[in-house]
Image (cartoon, grey):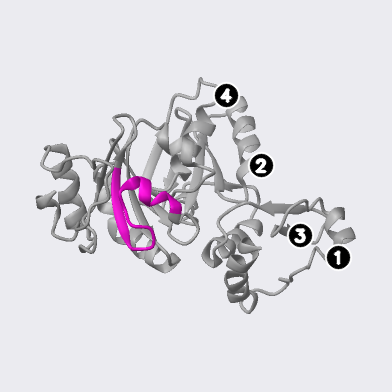
Amino acid sequence: MRWSHTLEPEWLSITNLHKGLMSIDCSANSALCNEFDIISYPALRYFDGHGHTKPYRGPRKASAMTAFLKRAHRPTVTILDDEKTPSFQSIDETVLIAHVNSRDEHITNAFRDIASQFEDRVSFGLEDTKGVTTVECYNNRDEQKFTLSDLSAVDALSNVLKSCMAPLIGEFTRANELEYLQSGKSLVFFFATSSSEREAYVNKMRPVAKMYKEYLNFVTVDGDEYAEFAEPLGLTAGAFPALSVQNPRMGQTFPYPEGADITPETVGAFVMDIVQGKVKPWDGQRRQDRARGHDEL
Protein backbone atom coordinates (compact mmCIF):
# COMPACT_ATOMS: atom_id res chain seq x y z
CA MET A 1 0.00 0.00 0.00
CA ARG A 2 1.23 3.46 -0.91
CA TRP A 3 0.46 4.96 2.51
CA SER A 4 2.39 2.19 4.26
CA HIS A 5 5.39 2.82 2.02
CA THR A 6 5.14 6.57 2.68
CA LEU A 7 4.88 6.08 6.43
CA GLU A 8 7.66 3.52 6.77
CA PRO A 9 10.72 5.81 6.46
CA GLU A 10 9.10 8.39 8.78
CA TRP A 11 8.32 5.66 11.31
CA LEU A 12 11.79 4.13 11.13
CA SER A 13 13.37 7.53 11.72
CA ILE A 14 11.77 7.77 15.18
CA THR A 15 11.99 4.14 16.34
CA ASN A 16 15.64 4.64 17.28
CA LEU A 17 14.78 7.73 19.31
CA HIS A 18 11.82 6.42 21.30
CA LYS A 19 11.61 3.19 23.26
CA GLY A 20 8.51 1.05 23.12
CA LEU A 21 7.68 1.58 19.44
CA MET A 22 6.82 -1.51 17.42
CA SER A 23 5.19 -2.46 14.12
CA ILE A 24 2.53 -5.14 13.65
CA ASP A 25 1.70 -6.73 10.31
CA CYS A 26 -2.11 -6.87 10.35
CA SER A 27 -2.21 -9.23 7.38
CA ALA A 28 -0.29 -11.78 9.46
CA ASN A 29 -1.82 -10.89 12.85
CA SER A 30 -5.45 -10.18 11.95
CA ALA A 31 -6.83 -11.40 15.29
CA LEU A 32 -4.67 -8.99 17.25
CA CYS A 33 -5.57 -6.07 14.99
CA ASN A 34 -9.27 -6.93 15.23
CA GLU A 35 -8.97 -6.91 19.02
CA PHE A 36 -7.96 -3.25 18.86
CA ASP A 37 -10.54 -2.31 16.19
CA ILE A 38 -8.01 -1.77 13.42
CA ILE A 39 -10.23 -1.83 10.33
CA SER A 40 -7.81 -0.12 7.92
CA TYR A 41 -4.11 0.44 7.94
CA PRO A 42 -1.59 1.77 8.41
CA ALA A 43 -3.03 2.82 11.78
CA LEU A 44 -1.22 4.14 14.82
CA ARG A 45 -2.23 3.54 18.44
CA TYR A 46 -0.69 4.66 21.73
CA PHE A 47 -0.93 2.29 24.72
CA ASP A 48 -0.50 4.06 28.06
CA GLY A 49 0.36 0.92 30.03
CA HIS A 50 -2.86 1.10 32.06
CA GLY A 51 -5.23 -0.49 29.59
CA HIS A 52 -6.08 2.68 27.69
CA THR A 53 -5.29 3.46 24.07
CA LYS A 54 -5.24 6.68 22.07
CA PRO A 55 -5.58 6.75 18.28
CA TYR A 56 -3.28 8.96 16.23
CA ARG A 57 -4.96 10.82 13.36
CA GLY A 58 -2.34 13.44 12.57
CA PRO A 59 0.14 13.77 9.69
CA ARG A 60 2.30 10.73 8.96
CA LYS A 61 5.48 12.73 9.53
CA ALA A 62 8.22 11.97 12.02
CA SER A 63 7.98 15.43 13.60
CA ALA A 64 4.19 15.17 14.02
CA MET A 65 4.36 11.65 15.48
CA THR A 66 7.09 12.73 17.91
CA ALA A 67 4.90 15.64 19.02
CA PHE A 68 2.04 13.18 19.55
CA LEU A 69 4.19 10.99 21.79
CA LYS A 70 5.07 14.00 23.95
CA ARG A 71 1.40 14.97 24.06
CA ALA A 72 0.35 11.47 25.06
CA HIS A 73 2.54 11.65 28.17
CA ARG A 74 0.71 14.75 29.39
CA PRO A 75 -2.82 14.95 30.84
CA THR A 76 -5.57 15.55 28.29
CA VAL A 77 -6.01 18.98 29.92
CA THR A 78 -3.08 20.54 31.77
CA ILE A 79 -3.98 22.75 34.74
CA LEU A 80 -2.14 26.06 34.44
CA ASP A 81 -1.43 29.15 36.48
CA ASP A 82 0.20 32.53 35.84
CA GLU A 83 3.65 30.95 36.06
CA LYS A 84 3.05 27.95 33.80
CA THR A 85 0.87 29.53 31.10
CA PRO A 86 3.55 31.54 29.20
CA SER A 87 5.73 28.49 28.55
CA PHE A 88 2.75 26.24 27.79
CA GLN A 89 1.66 28.56 24.96
CA SER A 90 4.55 27.33 22.81
CA ILE A 91 4.66 23.69 23.92
CA ASP A 92 3.07 22.36 20.72
CA GLU A 93 2.18 23.35 17.15
CA THR A 94 -1.42 23.97 18.22
CA VAL A 95 -2.25 24.97 21.79
CA LEU A 96 -5.72 25.82 23.11
CA ILE A 97 -5.88 27.55 26.50
CA ALA A 98 -9.10 28.40 28.35
CA HIS A 99 -9.07 31.08 31.05
CA VAL A 100 -12.31 30.23 32.84
CA ASN A 101 -14.16 32.08 35.58
CA SER A 102 -15.57 29.69 38.19
CA ARG A 103 -19.11 30.78 37.39
CA ASP A 104 -18.73 29.37 33.86
CA GLU A 105 -18.50 25.70 34.77
CA HIS A 106 -20.31 24.77 31.55
CA ILE A 107 -17.39 26.23 29.57
CA THR A 108 -14.99 24.02 31.51
CA ASN A 109 -17.10 20.96 30.71
CA ALA A 110 -17.31 21.89 27.00
CA PHE A 111 -13.57 22.52 26.93
CA ARG A 112 -12.82 19.09 28.43
CA ASP A 113 -15.17 17.48 25.90
CA ILE A 114 -13.41 19.02 22.92
CA ALA A 115 -10.03 18.18 24.46
CA SER A 116 -10.97 14.50 24.58
CA GLN A 117 -11.78 14.64 20.85
CA PHE A 118 -8.57 16.36 19.73
CA GLU A 119 -5.98 15.32 22.32
CA ASP A 120 -3.99 13.45 19.67
CA ARG A 121 -3.40 16.66 17.68
CA VAL A 122 -3.64 19.58 20.10
CA SER A 123 -2.36 20.49 23.58
CA PHE A 124 -5.00 21.83 25.98
CA GLY A 125 -4.49 24.01 29.04
CA LEU A 126 -6.99 25.29 31.61
CA GLU A 127 -6.47 28.25 33.93
CA ASP A 128 -8.76 29.81 36.53
CA THR A 129 -9.45 33.52 36.17
CA LYS A 130 -11.43 36.03 38.19
CA GLY A 131 -12.05 38.04 35.03
CA VAL A 132 -14.02 37.33 31.89
CA THR A 133 -13.80 33.81 30.49
CA THR A 134 -11.74 33.74 27.29
CA VAL A 135 -10.15 31.12 25.08
CA GLU A 136 -6.89 31.58 23.21
CA CYS A 137 -5.57 29.31 20.49
CA TYR A 138 -1.95 29.42 19.32
CA ASN A 139 -0.98 28.16 15.88
CA ASN A 140 2.76 28.19 16.55
CA ARG A 141 3.60 26.65 13.19
CA ASP A 142 2.31 29.72 11.36
CA GLU A 143 2.70 32.20 14.26
CA GLN A 144 -1.01 32.96 14.45
CA LYS A 145 -3.15 33.60 17.53
CA PHE A 146 -6.95 33.34 17.79
CA THR A 147 -8.85 34.82 20.74
CA LEU A 148 -12.43 33.94 21.60
CA SER A 149 -14.42 35.89 24.20
CA ASP A 150 -17.98 35.23 22.98
CA LEU A 151 -18.65 31.62 23.95
CA SER A 152 -22.42 31.78 23.72
CA ALA A 153 -22.64 29.74 20.50
CA VAL A 154 -22.72 25.97 20.93
CA ASP A 155 -20.00 25.48 18.30
CA ALA A 156 -17.82 28.45 19.34
CA LEU A 157 -15.01 26.30 20.73
CA SER A 158 -14.94 23.86 17.82
CA ASN A 159 -14.98 26.70 15.30
CA VAL A 160 -12.04 28.56 16.82
CA LEU A 161 -10.08 25.32 17.12
CA LYS A 162 -10.81 24.44 13.49
CA SER A 163 -9.57 27.86 12.34
CA CYS A 164 -6.50 27.59 14.55
CA MET A 165 -5.56 24.10 13.40
CA ALA A 166 -5.89 24.94 9.72
CA PRO A 167 -2.41 25.43 8.24
CA LEU A 168 -1.76 28.73 6.52
CA ILE A 169 -0.59 26.67 3.54
CA GLY A 170 -2.36 23.33 3.43
CA GLU A 171 -2.03 20.16 1.38
CA PHE A 172 -4.67 19.87 -1.38
CA THR A 173 -6.08 16.34 -1.67
CA ARG A 174 -9.21 14.61 -2.91
CA ALA A 175 -10.44 14.50 0.69
CA ASN A 176 -10.43 18.29 1.15
CA GLU A 177 -10.86 19.35 -2.50
CA LEU A 178 -14.51 20.33 -2.13
CA GLU A 179 -13.88 22.28 1.06
CA TYR A 180 -11.21 24.40 -0.62
CA LEU A 181 -13.22 24.92 -3.80
CA GLN A 182 -16.25 26.07 -1.81
CA SER A 183 -14.31 28.40 0.50
CA GLY A 184 -15.09 31.45 -1.64
CA LYS A 185 -11.40 32.22 -2.02
CA SER A 186 -9.08 31.86 -4.99
CA LEU A 187 -6.48 29.10 -4.76
CA VAL A 188 -2.74 29.24 -5.33
CA PHE A 189 -1.60 25.69 -6.23
CA PHE A 190 2.03 24.61 -5.89
CA PHE A 191 2.94 21.22 -7.40
CA ALA A 192 6.08 19.33 -6.41
CA THR A 193 6.92 15.64 -6.27
CA SER A 194 9.05 15.62 -3.10
CA SER A 195 7.75 16.39 0.38
CA SER A 196 10.96 18.28 1.17
CA GLU A 197 10.37 20.56 -1.82
CA ARG A 198 6.80 21.23 -0.73
CA GLU A 199 7.93 21.88 2.83
CA ALA A 200 10.59 24.34 1.67
CA TYR A 201 7.95 26.16 -0.38
CA VAL A 202 5.65 26.40 2.65
CA ASN A 203 8.42 27.77 4.85
CA LYS A 204 9.42 30.52 2.44
CA MET A 205 5.90 31.37 1.22
CA ARG A 206 4.26 31.88 4.64
CA PRO A 207 4.66 35.69 4.65
CA VAL A 208 2.90 35.97 1.27
CA ALA A 209 0.15 33.55 2.29
CA LYS A 210 -0.39 35.52 5.51
CA MET A 211 -0.57 38.79 3.58
CA TYR A 212 -3.33 37.49 1.27
CA LYS A 213 -5.11 35.03 3.59
CA GLU A 214 -8.38 36.99 3.47
CA TYR A 215 -8.62 36.42 -0.28
CA LEU A 216 -6.40 33.46 -1.20
CA ASN A 217 -5.82 29.92 -0.02
CA PHE A 218 -2.27 28.75 -0.69
CA VAL A 219 -2.03 24.95 -1.08
CA THR A 220 0.58 22.38 -2.04
CA VAL A 221 -0.09 19.34 -4.21
CA ASP A 222 1.80 16.05 -4.29
CA GLY A 223 2.85 15.96 -7.94
CA ASP A 224 3.26 12.17 -7.89
CA GLU A 225 -0.10 11.29 -6.39
CA TYR A 226 -2.21 14.06 -7.93
CA ALA A 227 -0.49 14.74 -11.25
CA GLU A 228 -3.88 14.71 -12.99
CA PHE A 229 -4.80 17.93 -11.16
CA ALA A 230 -2.16 19.84 -13.14
CA GLU A 231 -3.58 19.94 -16.68
CA PRO A 232 -6.98 21.47 -15.76
CA LEU A 233 -4.94 24.26 -14.15
CA GLY A 234 -3.08 24.97 -17.37
CA LEU A 235 0.07 23.17 -16.30
CA THR A 236 2.05 20.37 -17.92
CA ALA A 237 1.68 17.16 -15.93
CA GLY A 238 5.06 16.11 -14.60
CA ALA A 239 6.76 19.45 -15.32
CA PHE A 240 7.16 20.25 -11.63
CA PRO A 241 7.63 22.33 -9.58
CA ALA A 242 4.84 24.42 -11.01
CA LEU A 243 2.29 26.93 -9.80
CA SER A 244 -1.16 28.09 -10.88
CA VAL A 245 -3.81 30.43 -9.50
CA GLN A 246 -7.48 29.53 -9.82
CA ASN A 247 -10.62 31.53 -9.11
CA PRO A 248 -13.31 28.81 -8.79
CA ARG A 249 -16.13 31.33 -8.43
CA MET A 250 -15.31 33.05 -11.74
CA GLY A 251 -14.06 29.89 -13.45
CA GLN A 252 -10.71 31.52 -14.23
CA THR A 253 -7.23 29.98 -14.14
CA PHE A 254 -3.86 31.74 -14.30
CA PRO A 255 -0.92 29.36 -14.85
CA TYR A 256 2.41 30.69 -13.61
CA PRO A 257 5.10 30.87 -16.34
CA GLU A 258 6.55 27.42 -16.82
CA GLY A 259 10.19 27.15 -15.73
CA ALA A 260 10.23 30.56 -14.01
CA ASP A 261 11.62 30.84 -10.48
CA ILE A 262 9.00 30.43 -7.77
CA THR A 263 9.88 32.82 -4.96
CA PRO A 264 7.84 34.89 -2.49
CA GLU A 265 8.67 38.02 -4.47
CA THR A 266 7.73 36.65 -7.91
CA VAL A 267 4.57 34.91 -6.68
CA GLY A 268 3.49 38.05 -4.83
CA ALA A 269 4.04 40.09 -8.00
CA PHE A 270 2.16 37.51 -10.08
CA VAL A 271 -0.84 37.72 -7.76
CA MET A 272 -0.81 41.53 -7.93
CA ASP A 273 -0.64 41.42 -11.73
CA ILE A 274 -3.71 39.17 -11.76
CA VAL A 275 -5.58 41.57 -9.47
CA GLN A 276 -4.64 44.52 -11.68
CA GLY A 277 -5.72 42.72 -14.85
CA LYS A 278 -2.21 42.48 -16.28
CA VAL A 279 -2.48 38.70 -16.65
CA LYS A 280 -5.24 37.26 -18.82
CA PRO A 281 -7.03 34.06 -17.72
CA TRP A 282 -5.97 30.87 -19.42
CA ASP A 283 -8.12 30.17 -22.47
CA GLY A 284 -8.00 26.39 -22.02
CA GLN A 285 -5.64 25.84 -24.93
CA ARG A 286 -2.23 24.28 -24.42
CA ARG A 287 0.36 27.01 -24.73
CA GLN A 288 3.67 26.12 -26.28
CA ASP A 289 5.74 28.61 -24.37
CA ARG A 290 4.96 29.85 -20.90
CA ALA A 291 8.58 30.32 -19.93
CA ARG A 292 8.86 33.80 -21.44
CA GLY A 293 7.30 35.40 -18.38
CA HIS A 294 3.82 36.37 -17.30
CA ASP A 295 4.24 39.84 -18.79
CA GLU A 296 3.89 38.15 -22.22
CA LEU A 297 0.69 36.28 -21.40
Give the farthest residue toward the bottom: 16
Instruction: Determine whether 133 is above or below 180 in the image.
Output: above
Q: Amino acid at mark 2?
A: Ser
Tell me if label 3 and label 1 are in contact, CB under 8 Å.
no
Q: Residues within 10 Å of mark 3 (few under 14, many from 20)?
A: few
| Label 3: which secondary element | strand
Q: Which residue is mark 3?
A: 47
Whichever of callouts 2 and 3 sits on the residue coming sooner in the sequence is 3
Disc number placed over residue 103 in the picture, else none: 4
Whichever of callouts 2 and 4 sits on the residue coming sooner in the sequence is 4
162 or 25: which is nearer to us? Answer: 25
Tell me if label 3 and label 4 are in contact, CB under 8 Å.
no
Q: Residues within 10 Å of mark 1 (few under 14, many from 20)?
A: few
Q: Residues within 10 Å of mark 2 (few under 14, many from 20)?
A: few
Q: Which residue is mark 1?
A: 29
Q: CA distance from mark 2 to mark 4?
A: 22 Å
Nearer to us: label 3 or label 4: 3
> What span is in magenta?
228-245
Quadrant of the rendering where the N terminus is positioned: bottom right
Nearer to us: label 2 or label 4: 2
Q: Amino acid at mark 4?
A: Arg
Magenta stretch containing residue 27, yes or no? no
Whichever of callouts 3 and 1 sits on the residue coming sooner in the sequence is 1
Q: Amino acid at mark 1?
A: Asn
| Label 2: which secondary element | helix
Evaluate whether residue 70 shows in this view.
yes
Whichever of callouts 3 and 4 sits on the residue coming sooner in the sequence is 3
Q: Which residue is mark 2?
A: 116
Could you tell me which residue is drawn at 64 percent across and 37 percent down? 112
Tell me if label 1 and label 2 are in contact, CB under 8 Å.
no
